[in-house]
Image (cartoon, rainbow, N blue to C red):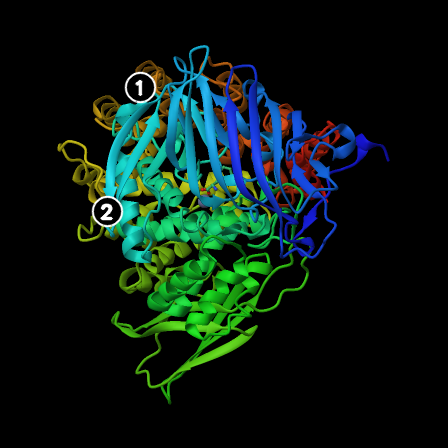
Amino acid sequence: MSQEMQQPQPIYLKDYQVPAYLIEHTDLRFELAEEETLVRATLQVRRNPACTRTKAALELHGHESVELCRLSIDGEILSERDFSRDDELLCIPAVPSRFTLECVTRIHPQSNTALEGLYKSDGMFCTQCEAEGFRRITFYPDRPDVMSVFRTTVVAERARYPVLLSNGNPVESGDEDDGRHFVTWEDPFPKPAYLFALVAGDLAVLEDSYTTASGRSVKLQIFADSKDLDKLDHAMLSLKRAMQWDEQVYGREYDLDIYMIVAVDFFNMGAMENKGLNIFNTSCVLASPRTTTDAAFQRVEGVVAHEYFHNWSGNRVTCRDWFQLSLKEGFTVFRDSEFSADMNSRTVKRIEDVALLRTAQFAEDAGPMAHPVRPESFIEISNFYTLTVYEKGCEVVRMLHTLLGAELFRKGTDLYFERHDGQAVTTDDFVQAMADVSGRDLTQFKRWYSQAGTPRVEVSDSWDESTGQYRLTFRQSCPATPGQDKKLPFHMPIAYGLISASGDELDAGVLELTDSEQSFTFDGLAERPVPSLLRSFSAPVKLSYPYTDAQLMHLLRHDSDGFNRWDAGQRMTVGLMQSLMVDYRASRELAVPESLIDTWRGLLLDESLDPAMVAHLLRLPSEAYLAELADEIDVEAIHEVREFMVTTLARALQDEWSEAYRRCSDDQAYTADAAACARRSLKNLSLGYLLATGEEVWLALAEEQFNTADNMTDQQAALALVVHSGFRHAGERLLAEFQAQWQHEALVMNQWFSIQASDPWPGALERVQQLQEHPLFDARNPNKLRSVVAAFCAQNAVGFHSADGSGYAYLADWIIQLNKQNPQIASRLLTPLTRWRRYPEAAQGLMRGQLQRVLESGDLSRDVYEVVSKSLA
Ligand code: PHE
Ligand code: ZN
C-alpha cells in the first residue's frame, strides 16, 4: 500500500507507556508577524527515571505545517542524519541523559484556518493548544503527562499589538528594534503543553480584584475588543462568585496573582482553561441585557465558572493521557453545574441538564460513535470532546456524590487534590480517593467508566394488603455498543420516595442496585404507595415503570422532589404524544384528552407555583427528545403531532395563556435575577401558545413586545415566535427590522441567522442557502457555521430530512469543503448524518450515500475519517 493510501490508525489506552524524557523547563520566544512567526524553544530535558526503556529515543510531536529552522543539543546543531521526521513525529535516537534542546520553527498563523495552535482571530493573535495544538507551534513532547515550567517572551509590533499575554506573571517588558516591544511571562506551576496560551492584540480590558480566603489579592482582567467593553460585567461577577464558591464548597483557593480571560470571535469550542489565561469564545463571555438572552447569561456564568474550576480540576491535577479526559471534564462539569444550581434554581438547573443528557447524550450512546466515559481507543482525540465524556462523566461523579454523601465526597476530593497536586493522573486515581475516604469497594462502580451505552432499568412492584408489605423489583440491562456486546451490571444509586394517597411521604432514601435483578421490600405500610423513582435523576439510565396517568398526576401534585414532579408531567405528555403518533400514521383523527387540558389549566392558574417550573412543565418535549425515544424516527409524525398538541392546547386554554402572559409582564425595568428570568420564561412560552392560535390579535401583541422590549430575551423570543409561526409576512418584516437594529453586533446576528435556519416552514434549504450569501456570513468563523449549517442540520429536522435527500447532500458538501479548512468543525457538523440507522429505509439509503460520498472525496482529515468510517461500519 502506498503512503497516501494508508488510513489513519487508532491508538489504544492499553498501549500507554510513561514518557522516556521529561521537560524541566521550557523557554519560548515568539516573534510575531503577519505572514510568519518565528518560535525559539529552549527545553531542559532529562531522562525519566520511571521509564525502563533505557535506549528510548527522544520523541517530539510535530505537524506538517511547521517548518523546522534549527535544532541543536547542548549547542551542537543537528544535521538531517541525526534525527528522523515525518508529518507527526520527530525522533532523535541518541541523546544524553540530561541536556538542553533548542528548536527554532517557523509557523504561519495567518493561514491557520483549523484554529489549532497559533492563529489569527480578526486582528489578534491567539492560541488553542488542547488537545494537541502545541505541536503546531514547535516540536515538543505534546502529551499531558509531560509537565514543565514555562517562561515565554512575546515580541510584536507595539502599535498593532500593544497587549502581549501568556501564562503566569509578567516579569519583564521593554522595547525591541523596528517599533516592536516584548513582554516576558513566567508560570511557576508545571503544566502540560496543552495549557499553554499566548495572546497579542489591541484589546480593551475590564479590571477588578479578588481577595482570597487566606487574604491574597488577585488581579482579575477580562480582555475584549473595545466595542465589547460594556459586555464584560456579568462575566466578571460570575468569576468572583465562582472563586468564592470554590473556596467555600471545595476549600480551593486560586494560586497565581493574576487571572486573565480573553474574548475571541474565532473559536472552535466554548472556552479554554489555559493556566492563568483563559481564552473564550465571545459567545461564552460577552453579555448585556440589551444584546443577550437570559439563557445566554446563564451560559456565560456556567462557562466562566467551569474554566475557573479547571484551575484545580484539570490544571493543578491533570490527565495522564487523553483517555482520561473525563477525569477533568466530567468532574469540572459536575462542579460548574452544582455552582449554577446554588446560584439559581436547583430544580430548574437539574431539569435542563437532564433534558440535554436524555436527548443528546442518550442519542450519542445509541449511535455509531458510542464510547465509554473513558474510551479505550481513538483515531482523533478531538472527536472525544463529547456529551458522553462531559455530561455523562458529570453524572458518574454525581453518583459518587450520591453514594458517599456530601461530607465524604468532600473528604474524597480533598484527598484527591492533596495526593495528586502537580501530577497527571487517571480516573482510577479519582475513584480510589473516594474509596479510601469512605472505605467502600468501588470496583463495580468503575464499570461506569469502561462500559458504554445507556442502561435500562425496568421496575415492577407488588403489594400485600394483609402484611402491609410493598416490594419493588428492578431489572437492569444495557444494549450492545460498538465493540462491546455484553455488559455487566452497573452499581447504581436509585433515589426514591413512597407517596401515600393523601400525598404524604411514607419513606424515602437511596437504593443501591448491583445485580441484574434485585428486589427491595418495605414493611409496615398502611396503604399501597405510589413510587417516586430515580429522584433528581440519580443515575443516567432509562427507567420504566408502568405508571397510570392517575399515578403520574399524583406525583405531579405531591412529589417532594421537584425534578420528579416535572418528570411525571413529561412522562404523561410523552406517552400521549407517542400514541398520537400511532394515530397519525394510521390517518386517525387526533385528540387531546380533556383531563390533560384540565391539568394544564390548573397549573397555569396556580399562582403559588414557581413560574419557571410551570414553564418547564408546560413546554412540550422537544422533537429531538421524541426522536431519541423512537425505535424508528418518523420526522413528519413527530413534527405534526407536536404542532397539533401546540395548537390544541393553545386554543383550549387561550384565556389562561393570555392571563399568564399578563401576570408575567411587568413594567419594571429589566433585571436578570432568577425570579425575573422565570417570569420571562413563562411569559414567552405563553406568547408562543397565543400565536399558535393563529389569531391576529396575538400577532399584534408579539409585535408590540418586539418593538418595546428593553432586553434581548423578550425581543428575540418575539422574533423567533413570529418567524416560526404562520404569519410569514410579519416574520419577514421583523427580521428586516432586527437586522437593521443589530447588524453591528455579531452575536446578536448569529441568533438572527439561527432563527431562520431552524425555521421548519417549507423552503428551508433555499432560505439557508440564501443566508450563506449574506455579507455577515463567514465560513471561516465557527460561530457562523453553527448558526447556519448546524442550526439547519441539527435543529430543523423537517428541513434537513426532506424526502428528496437535498438536506443530506447539502451537509455533505459542507463537510467536504471544511474537511481541510477546519477538521474539528467538519467532524462535529457531521453528527446528524451519522444517525442514519435510526431512520426509515429510504432515508437511510440517502444518508449513507452522502457519507459514502464524503468518504470517497479523498484526503480526509483524521477527524472526519474517524466519524465517517465508524458511521459506515
Ligand atoms: N477544555 C475545554 C473545556 O471544557 C474545552 C476545549 C477543548 C476547548 C478543546 C478547546 C479545545 O473547558
Ligand atoms: Zn472543561
Residue 784 in the image, given as x and y percentages of width and height? 47, 24
Q: Is residue 729 above or below residue 450?
A: above
Q: Residue shown at 29%/53% (left/top)?
A: 247
Q: Nearer the viewer, residue 843 or 563?
A: 563
Q: Is residue 99 left or right of residue 513?
A: right
The image quarter containing residue 523 is bottom left
Residue 203 vs residue 850, the one in the foreground: 203
Residue at mark 1: 227
Q: Amino acid at mark 1?
A: Lys
Give the image location of residue 339, x and y in percent. Answer: 32, 50
Query: Marks 2 and 1, Cα distance to the nearest angstrom?
Result: 36 Å
Q: Which residue is mark 2?
A: 611
Q: Residue at x 32, y 40 (%)?
A: 257
Does residue 598 lie above or below 720 as drawn? Answer: below
The quarter of the picture where the C terminus appears is top right
Determine the residue positioned at 67% across, 43% down. Answer: 379
Q: Which mark, residue 99?
A: none
- Decide: is 63 above or below 14: above
| Kind of residue indicated by mark 2 | Pro
Is residue 231 rendered to the left or right of residue 820?
A: left
Which is more toward the observer, 427 or 488? 427
Q: Quadrant of ligand 2?
A: top left
